Amino acid sequence: MTQLNEIVSWCDQTLSSAQFKDYAPNGLQIEGTSEVKHVLCAVTASEAAIDAAIAMQADVLLVHHGYFWKGEPYPITGMRGHRIKKLIQNNISLLAYHLPLDAHPTLGNNVAIADLLELERIEALDPNEKFPIGNIGYLTQAVSPETFKAKLQDTFDFNIIHLPAQVKSIQKIGFCTGGAQDFIAKAAAQGCDAYISGEVSERTFYEAQELNVHYFACGHHATERYGVQRLGKALSEHFSLKYTYFELNNPI
């Protein structure tokens, strides 16, 4: 059995969470039992994830998308209040890491999709960032946009949205999981043939055309389901804890 404060400290240090300016607090958001035997991981702290944690008698819910985002109302009411009440009533801690879990060089969402796509020579999408939020990687051989789209389709099991450019082949690829479609300009500045993120905006259609970078939307959830699994597994190995991943099957 492991103490909660040990887990929080290990995660904070491993992910260098204090180094990030984020949209929500990273680390322990809701404190439950002090002794931890079972950690349940999910992408988002939805009610379904909380219900799963309760049903599986987990002590900690570890997520990428937690609560208390900038701009949210302060009162803990409605849907969010209902979720938080369930966690507190069942003595379950909520541990959330957003940008630190995107950026970690071995546990993060970005490196996970680089591994899945077999990208090589990983570098920063923005060379000025100490802890890069986005990355660039290279295929061993250039492929057609159609072939690359099929590879993405098979990898993420998602209805890939491809916004085409005039580039005939793809080898240098920028990528950042989740809702980072606006980083396509950074990918263009670095001479990428294509850029991958999770979501797409109306303006992205024109940016792909005019910046001449193929854009592939691969799903916010689909691209971010891997970091929490890697972090959960690392936790379980370090502390000899039980770890379970709960798939929310979010199609967006």
Image (cartoon, rainbow, N blue to C red):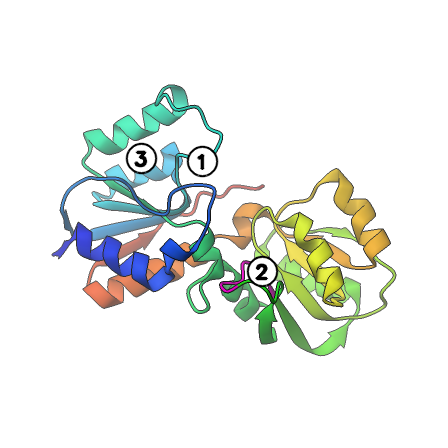
Question: In the image, is 143 to the left or to the right of 65?
Answer: right
Tags 2 and 3 touching, CB below 8 Å: no
Q: Label 2 vs label 3: CA separation? A: 33 Å
Q: Label 1 vs label 2: CA separation? A: 21 Å
Residue 118, x across and y down, in percent: 58, 73
Give the residue displayed 85% in from the left and 52% down from the top: 209
Give the residue displayed 78% in from the left and 64% down from the top: 145
What residue type is disc 2 on?
Answer: Gly
Q: Earlier in the sequence, mark 3 or mark 1?
A: 3
Tags 3 and 1 touching, CB below 8 Å: no
| 131 in magenta | yes
Give the residue displayed 56% in from the left and 49% down from the top: 178
Residue 123, x across and y down, in percent: 59, 72
Residue 165, x across and y down, in percent: 84, 57
Q: Secondary structure at mark 2?
A: loop
Q: Secondary structure at mark 3?
A: helix
Determine the residue located farthest toward the bottom in the rendered image: 140
Q: Is residue 118 above or below residue 212?
A: below
What residue type is disc 1 on?
Answer: Trp
Give the residue displayed 27% in from the left and 56% down from the top: 243
Q: Earlier in the sequence, mark 2 or mark 3?
A: 3
Q: Secondary structure at mark 1?
A: loop
Which residue is more in the foreground, 89 or 77? 77
* Other residues around mark 1 within 10 Å, as few (<14) / some (14–19) / many (≥20): few
- Per the rendering, the mark at residue 69 is 1
Query: Dot 2 corresponds to which residue?
Result: 134
- Magenta range is 130-135
* Other residues around mark 2 within 10 Å, as few (<14) / some (14–19) / many (≥20): many
Which residue is more in the foreground, 139 or 159? 139
- Nearer to us: label 2 or label 3: 2
